[in-house]
Amino acid sequence: MAYRTEQEKFWAGSFGDEYTERNYDQEGRLIANNIALFAKIIAASTHEWSTVLEFGANRGLNLHAIRTLRPGAELTAVEINPTAAAHLRTIVPNVHEGSILDFEPAEQYDFVLIKTVLIHIQPDMLPAIYEKLAQSSRRYVCICEYYNPTPVEVVYRGHTDKLFKRDFAGEFMAKFPEFRLVNYGFVYHGEAFPQDDVTWFLMERGSV
Ligand SMILES: C[S@@+](CC[C@H](N)C(=O)[O-])C[C@H]1O[C@@H](n2cnc3c(N)ncnc32)[C@H](O)[C@@H]1O
């Protein structure tokens, strides 16, 4: 597969395989933590939703948690890493294997999620990804990433150019003002049900 960015090749290759296997070792605990996170996010979303699209779903630990909380939800995922996509297919009926940058949404989904994926995207490509988020969402977009008020790069497991923090949700809403902020929150790594110090933003399309 020919990818446009170094970051896509990084995740499609052996680094992404190893990440996927590493997550397997702690699967039960990570799903419990995700259930605690998505219980808050679902409680913040006042309208019912049943169709979900996750960008960069890896082995499905978020979708697994969402399915536990919303058993009837119809799940769809986009994932660039083939090992992760193979795992995903065991729990998610609709898996699009490939880059978000090449994904053309054929329909809209009630709830569109991206969690710790924007931080790994080549920053010049962010406007194109924000476009995919807006295009594919019928109502909600949930961005759950590492927040920083100004863009910064952080060395990631010894690799440069692979992790960037910024105000992703703020940039998304500036580009698509039809989305308004519903709620947001921070999950500290020292909590009872920790996350990796992520900040979540739930946004809703205002004109629905
Ligand atoms: C840090 S992991 C996060 C996985 C999952 N979202 C979670 O919260 O557990 C980043 C995931 O995004 C995927 N990814 C990175 N860049 C991508 C791209 N351009 N298109 C599709 N998936 C991508 C990686 O393969 C990996 O599965």
Image (cartoon, rainbow, N blue to C red):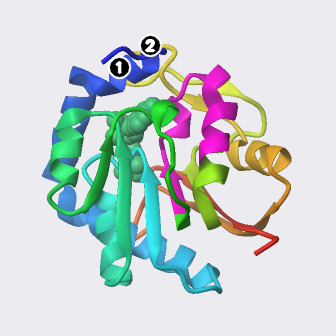
Q: Up-down: is 32 above or below 45? A: above
Tag count in the figure? 2
Indicate the position of residue 35 as horizontal and vertical percent values: 37, 74
- Quarter containing ligand 1? top left
Judging by the rendered image, the residue that carries numbered circle 2 is 6
Indicate the position of residue 125 as horizontal and vertical percent values: 62, 25
Secondary structure of the residue carrying numbered label 1: helix
Between the C-alphas of marks 2 and 1, the distance is 6 Å
Q: Is residue 43 visible?
A: yes
Left or right: 194 in relation to 146:
left
Indicate the position of residue 62 as horizontal and vertical percent values: 36, 61
Q: Measuring 77% from the left and 32% from the top, which residue is drawn there?
A: 150
Secondary structure of the residue carrying numbered label 2: helix
Q: Up-down: is 166 above or below 144? A: above
Left or right: 142 in relation to 203:
left
Q: Measuring 57% from the left and 84% from the top, which residue is drawn there?
A: 43
| Three-letter amino acid code of the residue under disc 1 | Phe
Residue 86 among magenta residues: no
Q: Up-down: is 96 above or below 152? A: below
Judging by the rendered image, the residue that carries numbered circle 1 is 10
Q: Residues within 10 Å of mark 1 (few under 14, many from 20)?
A: some
Note whether ligand 1 is within 8 Å of mark 2: no
